[in-house]
Image (cartoon, rainbow, N blue to C red):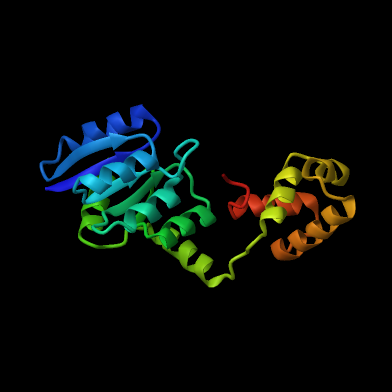
Amino acid sequence: MIRILLVDDHPIVRTGLRSLFENYPDLQVVGDLSSGEEALDFARTQRIDVVLCDLRLGAGMNGAQTTRALTSLPHPPRVLILTTFDKDAEILACIEAGAAGYLLKDVAAETIVSSIRQANAGQMVLAPEMTQRVLAGMRQPKIELTAREREVLTQLATGAGNKQIAKALFVSEATVKTHLVHIFEKLQATSRTAAITKAQELGLLEG
């Protein structure tokens, strides 16, 4: 019997998955929760084989953070991400956090079931095209922005000009310009629009 914990902030999704697994005698849902924090508390006291976790879980821990916390436990469960989001940076973040796989919610029900069985058996679960994207992402140097650069980038994404950014962050316009130069260099962008687009693709504006 594979003991499953469902983690999704949408009750209807948890209900649907619970109903699905009732059709399989080797699968047992031992809990369904709405947040990563609840999942971590639950996993500390219950034996879980596989956690089926959404990527975005409201205001608290996201799927990657939840995965990292769960896989750091003394007796860690296998974690499968089940989500509607397929940005390369998000997929890579989850795999680097220790996820056993990454599935999109539009896959067939049988694919979810077989993936749970594969994960429980210690296998990695990724669609072939997703595997190529993960490998490509791992080969690329990781882009690291400082906390201040992220703040400037977030302001930039709202459409704010240099003067507005400077006022919001309590710095000079010259300082903002310096941060923008560094941001553009790191993102290999030649314009504000290109920088924002690249940041969104990399998941740097999330959370």
- For the C terminus, the image quarter is top right
154 horizontally vs 26: left or right:
right
Of 101 and 32, which appears nearest the observer?
32
Q: Nearer the viewer, residue 5 or 87?
A: 5
Residue 105 visible to an observer of this rendering: no
The image quadrant that residue 110 belongs to is top left
**Residue at 48 percent of width and 35 percent of height:** 58
167 is higher (above) or lower (below) than 114: above
In-image side of 67 versus 195 (left or right): left
Q: Position of residue 127 (x, y in %)?
A: 38, 57
Query: How far across and down, in percent of the image, does residue 113 sit?
Result: 23, 46
Residue 170 visible in image: yes
Percent coordinates x, y for residue 65 in the rendering: 44, 51
> Residue at left 45%, top 44%?
61
Q: How many marks?
A: 0
For the residue pair 147 and 89, the one nearer the viewer reads as 147
Q: Quadrant of residue 4?
A: top left
- Horizontal and vertical percent for residue 122? 24, 62
